[in-house]
Image (cartoon, coloured by chain):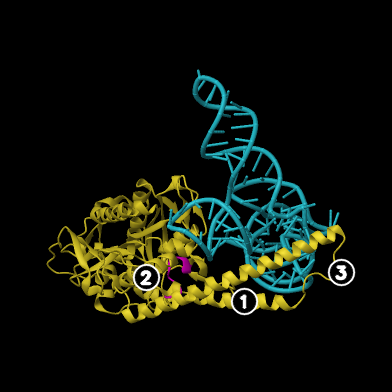
Chain colours: A yellow, B cyan
Amino acid sequence: MLDMELIRKDRDAVASALAKRLDPGEVTRALDEIEELDRQRRSLIGEIDAERQRRKAEARAYAAAKRAGTAPEQGPDPEAERKQLAELEGQLGEVQERLRTVMSELPNLPADDVVPGGKENNRVVKVFGEPPAIERVRDHVELARSLRLVDFDRGVKLGGSGFWMYTGLGARLEWALVNWFVDQHVAAGYEFLLPPHLLLDSAGFAAGQFPKFYDDVYHLDRDSAPRGQFLLPTSETAILGAYQDEILDTATLPLRAFAYTPCYRRESAGSHSDERGTVRGHQFNKVEIFQFVLPEQAEAALEDMLVHAERLVEGLGLHYRRSLLAAGDASASMRKTLDIEVWMPSTGKYKEVSSVSWAGDYQARRASIRYREPGGKQTRFVHTLNGSALATSRLFPAILEQCQQPDGSVLVPEVLRDRVGTDRLVPPTR
RNA sequence: GGAGACUUCGCCUAGUCUGGUCUAUGGCGCCGCACUGCUAAUGCGGUUGGGGUCUUAAAGCCCCUCCCGGGUUCGAAUCCCGGAGUCUCCGCCA
């Protein structure tokens, strides 16, 4: 949610930032409507407040008269005005509802250094390592099958198209990744959270997933979830929602937390060549890091989180790059997003394993998460940042492909060997 | 799943039966000031959150906020209806 006051005071700045993401005509239309609704809202509030004030005064005068024993048996006018107040309140309700709708559909303002346009305008800003030389590249699906790491067929049998099942050493590798990340985040001072996977709709709204992506998540049917619950598409939603409607103690900021959950998404499972296997599915594992910070801490926190996530990829010995996303390719709630993309030898492309973003106060405003200004009594919205660290189901294929050996085995990254229980993944003997 | 008790401005709490001087009590904590070799103690004052209005700004003024949403009433923390949550007991269960 954008700051209404900013729209009132500096509409032009808001408009030009939004134009990086939206068609200028659409921006003008939205801002015109918002300004008009805002005017109506304030004028209605003025009328209603004045009316209420009058009624309160009357009631108080009547009470005083009653105490003095001079009250008429019938108090102030019974019917007529109540109608009028109800009418005004009804109008206000409609205006506010509409204002909320329009406001909540507006995306965040991209940061100054974020360029307009889509994917094609993303800019690679850093490269780590280089593609390993592999003579005969096997893709991760082939490797996972031959080494019996993932059972795609039985996964589909269980969950339908778009699901898979990790098996044997594959399950251990996936689990080793999750656990190694957990240890790294704890060591970096993040608090470990294991949240519910089923969230109330209010959490989806706060994170900015709703209303826009309402249809992209799994909802429980109305009978079992009268208040509206859905399976979280990322634990970002849970971490943010956990602090909804709270005023955070400034001394605790920056507040760092991370969570591991599977992520459930309805998006169509890919059958393109570069989205085979575990690259895109309806359920995947991800560890998510999150920070609530003072506005002035945000920039440093973003870089801090990026570097932290990148260290994990480096620790696994994988070749990757960092890209600054153009406005149109980043999610709507974010002011700035950088992706960490890992090299996939089979497709010759880089695939996102982490997305690290700074939301400014956009999510905090939707979720009403604030801090008290030191000294002053003002409350202000915190800034939020989130980043995958990392999406294991994307890393898993990257490891298989980048660490594959000429004989068809896969060398396990050193940091995972204890947890996987072997140095090298080879086909099971029976 | 059933029954009962409960939810008050950071925490604890008075007030709810019997609607109006509740514009919400007191304690703790916190902030400021005073006193004091320092600390402590003590005294005085302040301390829910949101919105509107005015203003360069602050202050002020007004409205909302006693879990949430409706209702009754001239008037609701208080009465009625619906919902959420917490606790206790019972039932069921990994």
For this rendering, which residue is in front, A425 or B82? B82
Residue type for callout 3: Glu
Quick one: SS at disc 1?
Answer: helix
Residue A205 on the magenta span? yes
Label 2 Cα neighbours within 10 Å, binned few <14 / some 14-19 / many ≥20: some
Quick one: SS at disc 3?
Answer: loop
The magenta segment: A204-213
Mark 2 — residue? A11
Task: Determine which of the numbered discs, if any, sits on residue A88 in the image.
Answer: 1
| Disc with the residue nearer the chain's start (1 vs 3) | 3
What is the x, y in percent for residue B87? Answer: 67, 52
Distance (Cα) linking label 1 and label 3: 29 Å
Residue A219 on the magenta span? no
Above or below residue A333? Residue B17 is above
| Disc with the residue nearer the chain's start (3 vs 2) | 2
What is the x, y in percent for residue A181? Answer: 34, 54
Label 1 Cα neighbours within 10 Å, binned few <14 / some 14-19 / many ≥20: some
Task: Determine which of the numbered discs, if any, sits on residue A73 in the image.
Answer: 3
